[in-house]
């Protein structure tokens, strides 16, 4: 089963996509899934320090487990008024 990855704002622009899928692996955490995504899209590395993560629509930390079939959103900071 896969993990669906949603990308927003500048992250989506850099990756050229708003939605991706990666194969789930045993022991996946937010950080491990993110790192596999970075292997595919190294241009996202500069955004790492400011990213927020949401797993199945709940904010999570990098060490949280990611079950197969989940949706992981990578959210960069946004500004606006």
Image: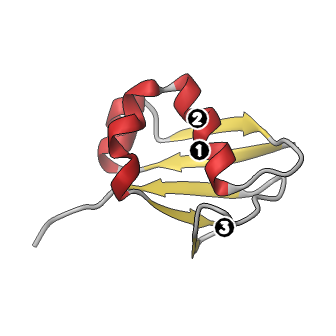
* Residue 34 percent across, percent down from the top left: 59, 44
Q: Do the residues under discs 2 and 1 have CB atoms within 8 angstroms?
A: yes
Question: Quick one: label 1, few (<14), some, or many (20+) residues within 10 Å?
Answer: many
Q: What's the CA distance linking mark 1 and mark 3?
A: 15 Å
Which mark sits nearer the N-terminus, 3 or 2?
2
Above/below status of 77 relative to 16:
below
* Residue 66 percent across, percent down from the top left: 75, 58
Q: Which SS class for mark 2?
A: helix
Q: What residue is at 17 percent from the left and 64 percent from the top?
A: 79
Q: Which SS class for mark 1?
A: helix
* Residue 32 percent across, percent down from the top left: 68, 45
Q: Nearer the viewer, residue 3 or 25?
A: 25
* Residue 78 percent across, percent down from the top left: 24, 61
Question: Residue 66 shows which numbered tag?
Answer: none
Above/below status of 67 relative to 18:
below
Question: Which of the two discs, 3 and 2, sits closer to the camera?
Answer: 2
Q: Which SS class for mark 3?
A: loop
Above/below status of 58 relative to 13:
below
Q: Nearer the viewer, residue 47 or 68?
A: 47
Q: Quadrant of the N terminus?
A: top right
Q: What residue is at 32 percent from the left and 49 percent from the top?
A: 9
């Amino acid at each position: 089963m896969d993990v669906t990855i949603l990308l927003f704002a500048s992250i989506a622009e850099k990756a050229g996509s708003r939605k991706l899928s990666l194969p789930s692996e045993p022991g996946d955490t937010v950080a491990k899934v993110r790192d596999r995504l970075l292997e595919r899209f190294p241009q996202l590395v500069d955004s790492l320090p400011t990213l927020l993560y949401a797993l199945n629509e709940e904010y999570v930390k990098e060490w949280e487990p990611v079950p197969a079939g989940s949706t992981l959103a990578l959210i960069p900071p946004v500004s606006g008024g």
